[in-house]
Amino acid sequence: MAEIKIGFVSRQQPESVQLVGMLIHQIQSEGKKVEIFVDEDIAVQIGREGTSVAEMEREKVDFIVSVGGDGTILRTIHKMADPVPILGINMGTLGFLVDVEPKDAIETLKRLLSGFVVDERSRLKLLLNGVCMPRATNEIAFLTASPAKMIEFEIIVDGALMEDFRADGVIVATSTGSTAYAMSAGGPIVDPRVDAIVLVPMAPFKLSSRPWVIPGDSVIEVRLKLPGKEALVVVDGQTSHTISSQDRVVISKAKKPARFVKVEKDGFYAKVKSKLT
């Protein structure tokens, strides 16, 4: 039996795929018992048998190495019901979910073969007319389906009306997602250790419509007030659905968290400072 199982996923760019091949070669040259799984989208390019991310989850890999940016990580998590830990290697730009630079990837992986710490992050569950949509690691964004035309929203939290406003959209984010789309829309940065949900109106008509930070176990209902108006619901920038005033949208904390391999010593505040300066 293999002592450790590691999966690999990557964006399609040649330099990312080449890095995957090099990392696998280095790991196998260590002489330790390691079972390798490679995502079917890139396996042929490095001459290996492909395995889907869902199969990696069923095989109970110890962690998945994601070579790319935040989008690569989010796509990978979306393919799992109970996400295994992810180690992000940064081949993107600003990513807050990717912790390891390519130059440090080999030494980091070698160190992790001897053990690692898992960082769990809350996700959001979206029910659309009672049907469960993919969970959100970063955010659920409600966007106007008609450019330059506002939507009128009602936001109900735990059965009480919290906000009634007109805007281009509204973002419902996790603490992890507070440094993603929500931050770009003027929302606060929230330490991911805080169990909270962030609501950020996008270009609201009233200056009094401000971002909110509410308890992480809140149940949120988002309603469109005007008949005939439609909005797009976008989950982590990966999946989208069109809704109208006839649809019922309920958001709550997901039972299964996202999981990340913890490698940084300096922590969240140092990461924010390095990414934003």
Image (tube, grey):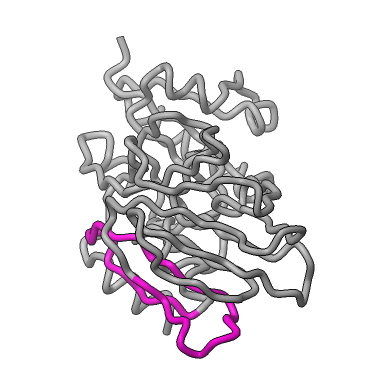
**Dominant SS in magenta:** loop
Q: Nearer the viewer, residue 21 or 140?
A: 140
User: Which residue is the extreme one toward the bottom?
Assistant: 207
Q: Nearer the viewer, residue 24 or 90?
A: 90
Q: Quadrant of the C terminus?
A: bottom left
Q: Nearer the viewer, residue 105 or 122?
A: 122
In the rendered image of this protein, does residue 115 appear above or below residue 142? above
Q: Is residue 225 left or right of residue 171?
A: right
Magenta highlight on residue 207: yes
- Magenta region, residue range: 186-212
Q: Is residue 26 left or right of residue 68?
A: left
Point out residue 102 in the picture as x, y percentages from the top left corner: 47, 56
Q: Quadrant of the N terminus?
A: top left
Point out residue 211 in the picture as x, y percentages from the top left corner: 41, 76
Q: Residue at x 40, y 65 (%)?
A: 161
Magenta highlight on residue 41: no
Residue 147: image quadrant is bottom right
Give the total of numbered labels: 0
In the rendered image of this protein, does residue 240 appear above or below residue 187? above
Q: Residue at x 34, y 61 (%)?
A: 175
Point out residue 172 in the picture as x, y percentages from the top left corner: 46, 61
User: Which residue is the extreme one toward the top?
Assistant: 1
Q: Residue at x 54, y 87 (%)?
A: 206
Q: Nearer the viewer, residue 29 or 248?
A: 248
